[in-house]
Amino acid sequence: MSQDKVQIFDTTLRDGEQSPGASMNTEEKLEIARQLVRLGVDVIEAGFPISSPGDFESVRRIGTEVGDACVVCGLTRAIPADIESAADALKTAARPRIHTGIGVSESHLVDKLRISKETALERAVAAVKLSRTFVEDVEFYAEDAGRAEPEFLYRMIEAVVAAGATVVNIPDTTGYAYPELFGDLIGGLFNGVRGIENVIVSVHCHNDLGMATANALAGVNAGARQIECTINGIGERAGNTAMEEVVMALRQRPDVFGVDTTINTREITRASRMVSNITGIGVQPNKAIVGANAFAHSSGIHQDGILKERSTYEIIDPVEVGVGGSSIVLTARSGRHALRHRLEVLGFSLAADEFESIYADYLVIADKKKEVYDEDLEVLVGERERTLHDVYHLEKVQVTTGEPGIPTATVELVTRDGVHMIDSSHGTGPVDAVYKAINRMIDVENDLSEFSVNAVTRGIDALGEVTIRVTAGDGHIFTGRGAHSDIIVASAKAYINALNRLLVSQETAGTDVTDGV
């Protein structure tokens, strides 16, 4: 590989999906995989095949889908059954990679695996050798390398390189490292590991202390030539290195790093919104590169500078990351052409029938608001995408509440087979009454663990967006989102969305095995 290129290894579909409530079905994973190809990522980590039939099928179908556009990777532990399952799932891939590994820190060896260093070495070498009997491209991860003894880490890396690993992954699994020390850890590989010049060194950093991007970039400066990351930085706990951040840092500062990626940055915003809509995990407004406020200016001084010369307050041209610069103000008087233009600027490409459905919903909102904002349009498209494969659809909801009085709700649902269901209930408040009425019709064990309401845009006429999380009887967490000008209706939509995700998951349930870097 060229020394002036950094490979982008995207693990949104594997590590990203391990975010609580972010589980995706196979069709959703395929949709994101197609976008990753448009982005131009070098490697897609498509899943952990042995963890469930769904993950196995996702890896298999993504291998078929992407062809030779990029490497398709499957995660395993250093266990023969894991490796054999991954090899089987990857048979459809033109460029398959098995990603296997084992813990290397004292914590993982003693407390989790309960094995000696020598046993860990033996298992690591055996895993790489077995993987090489199935594929030529084998990546080895040294889990929790950020807390490992460097001498033992280097010894293990030297052993797996000799055994046939083509990529070695140095993960800061717990987000414990900081840039200076992590850079030194990576630099030590090149100073003390025989054969390291023949493989690619990869970094996989977590964001527990908010330093995932900084640590990954420190690794690059020390010689790493692959970064493992996710769209929007989603992942276990505080998440992973955010792809958009490292890609744009390398692109903007060639004077510091002297390397670049081959990512098509104009697809970044589209990818961010897609992942957010599918997973139900919103992007914070001040998130670097892809947040709603990333290219917004409210200060008069800033506005004056921007109008005179964009670069006075923007180091990145928003067009370069797929954010349009259109100033069209959408109202009820705007026609189809203006709406379609704005949707395209926002990265949404809709078929004629899809657009007409969005346009009808848009007119309802536009009649209630003085101005329809980009965020309103994103919610409209997200609402439609969230309800495409519903088991139940919310048809009507009516509530009676007040003081004195007993909050009462009547709800009408329609099944995907077209059956109409109506029931009523009372509760401590209107939302409680609505949810109890829904529960009378959809009898599925769950516990409401989180409920939040946000205004999508400014003003008293803003759409309200409700996000909830429910915990199923088996402990899995499902996120639901709903938006409407009436917050009670939005609450009902969010609950139905969460229950639909739960029900679809139960329909395609498999054994869940979680592990990773």
Image: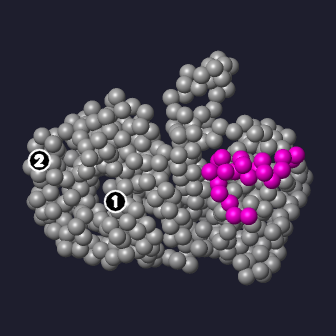
Q: Which residues are magenta?
A: 332-352
Tell me which residue sits at (67%, 68%) in the image.
388
Question: Residue 301 — which label?
Answer: none
Residue 375: horizontal and vertical position, in percent? Answer: 69, 45
Residue 8: horizontal and vertical position, in percent? Answer: 37, 50
Tell me which residue sits at (33%, 50%) in the image.
7
**Residue most extreme to the right:** 404
Mark 1 sits on what residue?
Answer: 516
Question: Residue 193 — which label?
Answer: 2
The amino acid on which the numbered mark 1 sits, given as a three-letter code, is Gly
- Give the color scheme: rainbow, by chain, secondary structure or one colour: one colour
Residue 501 image-quadrant placement: bottom right
Of badges 2 and 1, the one in the foreground is: 2
Quick check: is 130 in the magenta stretch?
no
| Front one among 4 and 289 | 4
Disc 2 is placed on an element classified as loop
Residue 201 in the figure: left or right of residue 56: left
Tell me which residue sits at (78%, 51%) in the image.
337
Disc 1 is placed on an element classified as loop
Residue 248 in the figure: left or right of residue 447: left
Residue 133 image-quadrant placement: bottom left
Look at the image and tell me in which quarter the C terminus lies. bottom left
- Real-space Cα distance between discs 2 and 1? 24 Å
Residue 113 in the figure: left or right of residue 392: left
